[in-house]
Image: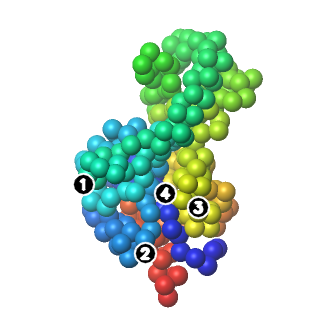
Amino acid sequence: MSQTLPKLISTDFDGTLVHHDHDPVDFRPLWEFLTYLQEAHGVLWAINTGRDLDFTLCGLEDYQITAKPDFLLTMEREIHLPAQEGGSSAWVPHLAWNERCQEDHLALEQKITPQLHSFHQFLKMETTANPVIEGGRFVGIEASTEQELAQIVLRMEDFFAKATEFSYQRNGIYLRFCHINYHKGAVLQELSRMLSLEPSQVCAAGDNFNDLAMLEPTSAEYLIAPVNAIPEVKEALRKHRGIIAEEIAGLGVLQALKTIFMAKEA
């Protein structure tokens, strides 16, 4: 592992910072430690989430997250930067990256329109899952259970087998279609490029399928998963010698960050 401390921390939101299905937990020690790292070490913090921008901002307020992220990476693909004016709650898109991202996704959607139509019919006729429609576009799935989604994924791969640019991001009962070049790893790598950082200077924390792309040495050398992470994430971290914390969500991230920074400071 690198001899330098991380200069950028990328964290998932749901399941990594906060936990929905657990007794109320006080995650304030994590917010305090993130603020300490920002102020004392100049560490930058990015939230890297499948939520869109508005839902992310709502989450920061709902969970009373007092630490201030330096970047918001949303929908597993978009980059948002703090506005120069307008206060800490104002964010602006990184236009060059986000517009290219949107163009590539729209071009892919046009290419696979017949497959999308056939798959939509399959969902309607053979599953209890709901198609996710945004702006009249079929963009993903909301399954009834995680088990149902796992079965749908197996069938979905047959529908899109010849669509080489097609991929998807999956978390719990939700799945979003995407271009194969855009995921949490790709957006984290782009942010690192903007900041002139190498993977050896980056830390990533996540718990679910859609986090796997950033929990790779190509994106970050320091890798963290809380105890509630799915088995696939834990297996990836064992492979890459990451830290699997003993605590849930934000408390696990806190435990791992203290291990990393205190070991380096000792």
Q: Label 2 belongs to which residue?
A: 41
Which tag is nearer the camera, tag 4 or tag 3?
Answer: 3
Residue 15 position in % (x across, y down): 42, 51
* Residue in the picture at 51% in, 68% down: 7
Of the numbered discs in the image, which one, if any, rests on residue 196?
3
Considering the numbered disc 4 on the image, is that residue within a helix, a strand or a loop?
A: strand
| Disc marking residue 64 | 1
Q: What amino acid type is highlighted by mark number 4? A: Ser
Q: Position of residue 137 (x, y in %)?
A: 48, 18
Mark found first going from the N terminus, 4 or 3: 4
Q: Closer to the N terminus: mark 2 or mark 1?
A: 2
Q: Determine whether label 2 and label 4 are within 8 Å by CB.
A: no
Q: Label 1: state its secondary structure.
A: loop
- Does residue 164 appear left or right of residue 198 in this picture? right
Between discs 3 and 1, the one toward the N terminus: 1
Does 135 sit above or below residue 63?
A: above
The correct choice, above or below, for 33 with respect to 193 in the image is: below
> Circle 4 sits on which residue?
10
Indicate the secondary structure of the residue bearing disc 2: helix
Choose the circle earlier in sequence order: 4 or 1: 4
Residue neighbourhood size for the residue with mark 4, other residues' Cα within 10 Å, grouped as few (<14), some (14–19), many (≥20): many
Q: Nearer the viewer, residue 105 or 134?
A: 105
Which of discs 3 and 1 lies nearer the camera? The answer is 3
Mark 2–mark 1 Cα distance, whole angstroms, equals: 23 Å
Amino acid type of the residue tagged 2 in the rendering = His
